[in-house]
Image (cartoon, rainbow, N blue to C red):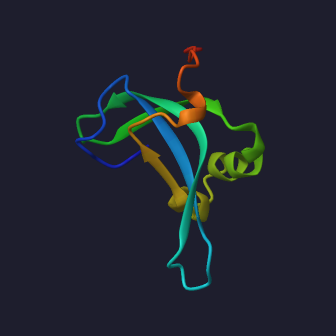
């Protein structure tokens, strides 16, 4: 579930990133792609629902933390209205 944004519409593909601070001060942040999803609903209250379509397998621990709704993991996830280059040109099957 994401907060409102005019950048997202129903059925667009998105990339899910996990942000990590590279230094103790938190100034340097690295975002690494951990999955691809699709916006399945923009609710009347403008909250956005995303279905995960593919997970980067090397990030199983990140996904475990997100699924367990750990506050730090949810705070560190970023969703952008684009598809990262590793998924470009690859068919994305919707298993619904």
Residue at 23% in and 35% down: 44
Give the quarter of the figure containing the C terminus. Answer: top right
Rendered view: 73 above or below 41: below
Up/down of 88 relative to 74, above or below: above
Percent position of residue 67, x then y: 65, 45
Q: How many marks?
A: 0
* Residue drawn at (69%, 38%) of the image: 56
Residues 32 and 76: in front is 32
Q: Name the spot of residue 20 as percent of width and height, x first.
A: 60, 65
Q: Is residue 92 left or right of residue 39?
A: right
The picture places residue 69, in percent across and down from the top left corner, at: 60, 53
Residue occupying image coordinates x 53% and y 79%: 26
**Is 4 on the left or on the right of 30, as rendered?**
left
Residue 80, compared with residue 70, is above or below; it is above
Q: Residue at x 55, y 85 (%)?
A: 25
Looking at the rendered image, the quarter that the N terminus falls into is top left
* Quadrant of the rendered image containing residue 52: top right
Query: Which of 28/39 is in front?
Result: 28
Q: Is residue 41 left or right of residue 61?
A: left
Placement of 70 over or under 54, stated as above or below: below
Place residue 24 in its image quadrant.
bottom right
- Position in image of residue 82 (x %, y %): 42, 36
């Amino acid at each position: 579930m994401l907060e409102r944004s005019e950048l997202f519409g129903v059925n667009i593909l998105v990339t899910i990133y996990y942000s990590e601070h590279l230094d103790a001060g938190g100034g340097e942040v690295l975002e690494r792609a951990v999955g691809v999803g699709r916006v399945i609903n923009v609710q009347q209250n403008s909250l956005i629902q995303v279905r995960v379509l593919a997970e980067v397998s090397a990030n199983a621990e990140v996904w475990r933390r997100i699924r367990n709704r750990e506050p730090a993991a949810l705070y560190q996830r970023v969703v952008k209205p684009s598809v990262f280059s590793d998924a470009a040109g690859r068919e994305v099957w919707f298993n619904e």
